Image (spheres, coloured by chain):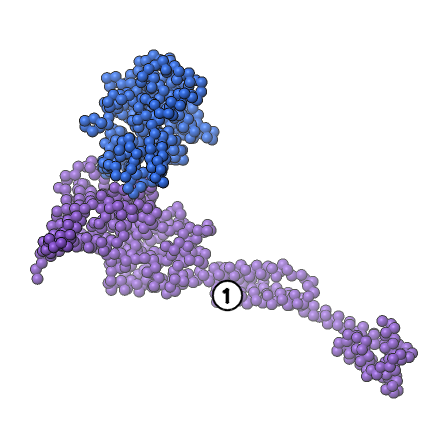
Chain colours: A blue, B purple
Amino acid sequence: MTVDGSFNSEQKVFIRRNWNKPLLKFLTKRVNDRLIYLGLPSPKAEDIIEWIEYIKSVIAFQCRNYGEVSKEGQDRTGIDELTRLLFQLEREKKINNYMVFDGWLEEIVLRGYDNSPTRIDFELHDFITLYNLDFCNKITSPIEFYDSNGDIKTAYKFDAINSLLQIQKSLTNVSNKFVLFLTVHCSYDEAEIQNFISYPPNREIGGYIQRCNYLGGHEKNARIVRLFFAYYIKQKFEAFGFTPKLLPSLFYQGLKDVNLLHFTVFGINPTNTIAGSAPTYQTLDDILNQKFISIDNLKFVNKNINFDGEKDVELNPVKLFSDSATFKYLWQTKDKK
Amino acid sequence: MKLNKFDIGGEVISILTKGMYPDPKDALREYIQNGVDALAKKINLKIRQDSIVIEDNGKGMNHEALRKAVRVGISEKNPTKNVGFLGIGIYSSFHLCDKLTIYSRGSENISNKLEMDFGGMRATLEVQKEMRLTGETKPDELIDLQTLLEKFITLTENGSIKDFEFPNVGTRVELTGLETEFYTALSNFADVAEYLRNVIPLHFDKTNFTYAEKIETEISKICEEHNQKFEIINLHLQINSKQETLYRPYKDSEFYSREKTKPLPPKFYAIQNGEFFGVAWGCLNSLRKKVENKALRGFILKKQGFSVGKRESMVKYFPRGNTFFDRYSGEIIIVNPNLIPNASRTELEYSPLRSVFYEHLTEVTEKYDALGHEYQEYTKGDDELSKLNDKIKEEIGSYNENEGNPEVLVSKIIRVKDIMNDLQGRIDRKGFRPETQKTAESLLERAKELESVFQERLKTLTEDKKKKQYMRKESALQIAKKLSQLKITKIAETNKYESLYDLLKDLEFNIDNELKEVICLIDEKFIQKDARTREEYYSLLNELKDEILNDF
């Protein structure tokens, strides 16, 4: 946390304003409406405030003690602060609606209710058009929570994303386009990802991992985490009939110089496909062959590492997406308001 | 006698609100009612764990109106125009939340904010109460109402709220720092929705209730004809993630859920006697049964759309009690400004006009009872007509033109006569609806024709039998002749038969009365005539007996 109490580094603020925001403006036009946000804002909701003109309503998850299992008696200050802020934004008509859940996204989504004293059930009735999953820990870091029997359970990010996509799929009559931003630490050490490295799902992936081993430190980590994320997110999206489009990954410094990765995935549930199958216009190789984008002097730049034939990428996020085959083939129709 | 502000203690606000609003949901009704009185067309009610917000798009309150809103028991509202007017409703959440904040933009297009620190007021009163119990405070030292309110109510300077803080049109009521019990009582969506559906002047459900549109239109029309307005609002309820636009509770399926059916079209009656009181509407269950949903059985009294009392309290105004009342679902909507509900909304306030209203209400309820009765008779008549028609068909279908069994014919005639009696009875007491009366009459004619066909056949059958009997008489004569020509040789065994009839009976011939007469005649003409003595007569009869025994 910075001195002013914010959780944001300069680079994060820059990304929010210059990467996410133009994309949200673009998406707002495509869905012909302001967006429904589901995410993990800080108590000051800097992301929501930054994007407020594009956000219609907010579904927020706010944990109590960072890094601890949720339980009674923990301080609710952050939850109350966020709630007051959203309450005010609603009164000021900047947003139409909001909902704050007390606890970790993973536990609430998977268990079905939050940790509020009067327990609020987790229900989604709207198609989420903007996910901002700013996890700020490792991609496979699990959280622990108490289930309804009082037993400790473990929940993973990808399990929660899976559940969210499942609900999202059931709401595709409302809308079918969305974007998912996901931020994680550029490191890994949990068994899941180690297992993925030791037993890669196919030979190509195994080869890529081997080549990454030539790199050291966070350059290697960034590529392994990107591979892991891209491989699973593509699977999850396609399993629920959503065609994903991953934009190049952002590699930047957070507070205390922690290396972070910011992923952007557009999803669409194409309306005219053969039952259950979503066409894809981007392979895993396409994603892995892209250079990372980093921030230099508050400008986006291609991260200049020569590795495995990685190519420079366009730095304008809107152009990146609007020039893609996915956009050309699937995103041409605007939603009716 | 002169009183001063110290004569009314602050505790009075706690006592009043506790008594007047026993159900936490009553507070929601009060704030929504203010929106309706402010001519709002739409009201949003959002209930979350930390807050309740009631937002309307009505005409709002200016600084002066907000100032006056805090008065206790003095209202600027016109009781003849508004439902809420008692000047206490703003305090209805006194025991339920720590803070009530009202933002409103009035006619001058300036936003103002009123804050009422109920938590502070309650804490002050609580401390006082404890000090009284321990004797630390004397009654004269207790805080008075005026001081309590002044201390804990804040109204911003006129115009000091910036536009962006409250850009809305209308009024926004915020309840924050909710008591846990209050929130718990309001966290069940179905419960709160049901309560509001019954007490708030909502639209009718056009998707699920066939007559929704018709009822709204007709009531408005009748009210307009009498220079009154029928108010309806859109209410959107949200409790945490769940939200829904609420409608009045009437649906086709509430009448009878197991079959896809709808109630009878609504009947409307203006309740009036020179003076217009309001309109009643009611839909009768089309299945001659009670309305399935008990909560919707009968009529509810409403002042505009706000319920006054419960449905069951209206039964006493229906002459036939629950008999037909329970088969209706409807409302008695009062729009007369001079009929006012009491503070707890359980009854109309006592007034001479109230008595006149109830008197004229009975004229309307009698009509509903009569309609119920008539429908009961008519539908029974329909059923009966259908059954009798089937019976007639059955009699025709099972009839054989060559029926030879008179017993079958007699049974058929009895059954057709029963059908005729049933039809005639219901026709005589006008038990068929006018449009089916002719059908019933023609069915009766058909039954009569059928009866005459059966009678005719029976007659034919009787005549045939007589003919057969005559034939049988002929053959008896021939037998007698034959007997007379028999050659009598000897008497094997002499029996002293007193007559030919005795002889034949001894031989076990079956002889009916007619035949007996014939035999006696033969006996006299042919046998007795030939015998000179009784012994000879016995002998002849015995000879005859032998002949018969040999021949048969």
Q: Nearer the viewer, residue A289 or A268?
A: A289
Q: For label 1, count other residues whose C-alpha is less than 10 Å away and answer few (under 14), some (14-19) or many (20+).
A: some
Label 1: element kind: helix
Q: Is residue B241 above or below residue B124?
A: above
Task: Work out whether residue B176 can be spotted.
Answer: yes
In percent of the image, x 47 and y 51: which residue is there? B259
Which residue sits furthest front?
Answer: A151
Task: Work out whether residue A90 can be spotted.
Answer: no
Q: How far across and down, in percent of the image, does residue B550 sit?
A: 88, 73
In percent of the image, x 75 and y 70: which residue is there? B468
In percent of the image, x 24 and y 58: which residue is there? B342
Q: How far across and down, in percent of the image, does residue A35 sit?
A: 31, 32
Amino acid at dot 1: Arg
Q: How far across and down, in percent of the image, does residue B312 sit?
A: 34, 59
Chain assignment, label 1: B
**Screen quadrant of the C terminus of chain A:** top left
Q: Nearer the viewer, residue A57 or B458?
A: A57
Which residue in the structure is indicated by mark 1? B426
